[in-house]
């Protein structure tokens, strides 16, 4: 994505982006789209039919960002003998570059790619170029909300606000604007949006939903927001005022949880961290999150997606594995079991949810708009950098 000069930031930010990246699907007359059709990525074949074709292929290669994928692969090999599965667990920061480098070099190693989309890079730089394909058979995905079907969704993870349960019986904040109040000065843990897309993306969504932020400001403070000359809208105003209130910048979600959840504190901070970190309750941290109390939104989801690589060697094994991974036609199969955990949610209604998970429908979230995020995140990042202490 192109870097935007700070000097041009405010003028550019005054206008909403009218630029469109176009369709996220590969053009229907392209060679890549033809390959997808020829290999049945637009069909919904039965599991038995796919198994026979997959056995003829004999193997499958997966690049994934989750160690749990190996458990899925082990269960798959038991269910479907004769298909070898190789799983490569690769960090999210490395996986995209590795795949792109191999693909552009003509190397066709991987069949299934599993990663996380939050800023539109995969959507506009790989799917639209035909390097990756969706596979969304109706027998599996017919009840998934359309808003999550831009890519083939595996599950959602969120960043949520954590608090210390030794000090607070319930979540002590109900609005993003609370973090600009004097009582929270130096007591809010965040990560650096200059280098962390998972933190810059929700701020970009906030700028997109500036009218909601302005209405919430009036709800919290009892008066309309007055914007300074360097505050293009209420979303940008929040970023500037939040940074002026001396947030603690952590290096990762583990550090956020350590600062928030350490026992014995009298005046602990709150912190924004990955929802999966609720598991650290088992490590003795006094933490919980309260996403249902937020007035406007907790942010935007990070979409874990599955894709089939263009021109892969084992497309039928890939299709069979994806059906298995999603829990089969009833959603209750062993393929999805390793994904059932606190702090992650399936968007498929048939899949089970972890005990203690707040229903996804009860969590205020902004819809994922990859087009807006992709085209505006660098503007927001530059604004953050310009106002960072």
Image: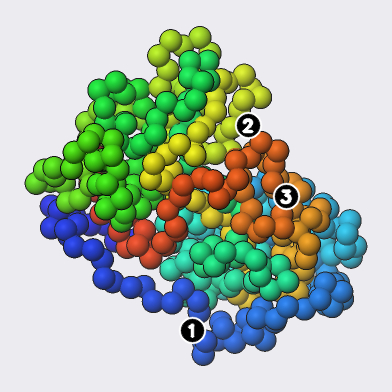
Reply above or below: 343 against 182. Answer: below
The answer to which image quadrant residue 248 occupies is top left
Lower sequence index among marks 2 and 3: 2
> Looking at the rendered structure, which numbered label has been put on residue 352?
3
Q: In the image, what residue occupies the spot 25% across and 47% down?
A: 214
Q: Is residue 270 left or right of residue 158?
A: left
Tell which tag, 3 or 1, sits nearer the viewer.
3
Q: Secondary structure at mark 1?
A: loop
Tell which tag, 2 or 3, sits nearer the viewer.
3
Q: Secondary structure at mark 3?
A: loop
Residue under numbered circle 1 = 27
* Name of the residue lying farthest toward the bottom: 29
Rendering coords of residue 94 (x, y %): 52, 51
The answer to which image quadrant residue 175 occupies is top left
Rendering coords of residue 29 (x, y %): 51, 90
Lower sequence index among marks 3 and 1: 1
Rendering coords of residue 145 (x, y %): 57, 64
Q: In the image, what residue occupies the spot 26% across and 66% down?
A: 17
Q: Secondary structure at mark 2?
A: helix
Lower sequence index among marks 2 and 1: 1
Q: In the image, what residue occupies the spot 64% across and 53% down?
A: 346
Residue under numbered circle 2 = 279
């Amino acid at each position: 994505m192109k870097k935007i000069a700070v000097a041009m930031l405010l003028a550019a930010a005054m206008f909403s982006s009218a630029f469109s990246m176009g369709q996220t699907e590969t053009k229907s007359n392209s060679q890549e789209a033809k390959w997808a059709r020829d290999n049945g990525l637009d069909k919904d074949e039965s599991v038995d039919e796919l198994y026979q074709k997959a056995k003829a292929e004999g193997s499958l290669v997966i690049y994934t960002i989750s160690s749990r994928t190996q458990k899925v692969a082990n269960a798959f090999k038991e269910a479907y003998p004769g298909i070898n599965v190789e799983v490569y667990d690769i960090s999210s920061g490395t996986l995209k570059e590795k795949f792109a480098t191999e693909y552009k070099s003509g190397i066709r190693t991987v069949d299934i790619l599993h990663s996380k989309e939050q800023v539109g890079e995969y959507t506009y730089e790989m799917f639209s170029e035909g390097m990756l394909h969706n596979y969304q058979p109706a027998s599996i995905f017919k009840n998934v909300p359309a808003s999550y079907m831009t890519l083939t969704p595996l599950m959602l993870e969120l960043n949520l606000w954590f608090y210390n349960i030794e000090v607070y019986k319930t979540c002590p904040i109900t609005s993003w604007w609370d973090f600009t109040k004097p009582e929270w000065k130096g007591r809010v843990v965040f990560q650096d949006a200059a280098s962390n897309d998972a933190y810059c993306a929700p701020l970009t969504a906030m700028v997109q939903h500036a009218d909601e932020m302005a209405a919430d400001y009036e709800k919290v403070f009892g008066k309309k927001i007055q914007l300074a000359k360097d505050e293009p809208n209420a979303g940008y105003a929040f970023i500037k005022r939040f940074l002026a209130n001396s947030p603690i910048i952590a290096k990762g979600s583990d550090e956020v949880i350590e600062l928030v959840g350490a026992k014995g504190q009298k005046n602990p901070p709150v912190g924004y961290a990955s929802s999966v970190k609720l598991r650290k309750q088992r490590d003795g941290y006094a933490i919980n999150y309260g996403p249902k109390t937020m007035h406007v939104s907790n942010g935007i989801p990070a979409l874990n997606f599955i894709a089939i690589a263009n021109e892969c060697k084992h497309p039928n094994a890939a299709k069979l594995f994806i059906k298995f991974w999603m829990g089969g036609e009833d959603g209750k199969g062993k393929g999805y079991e390793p994904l059932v955990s606190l702090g992650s949610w399936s968007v498929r209604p048939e899949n089970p949810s972890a005990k203690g998970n707040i229903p996804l429908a009860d969590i205020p979230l902004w819809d994922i708009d990859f087009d807006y995020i992709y085209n505006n995140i660098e503007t927001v990042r530059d604004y953050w950098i310009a106002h960072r202490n």
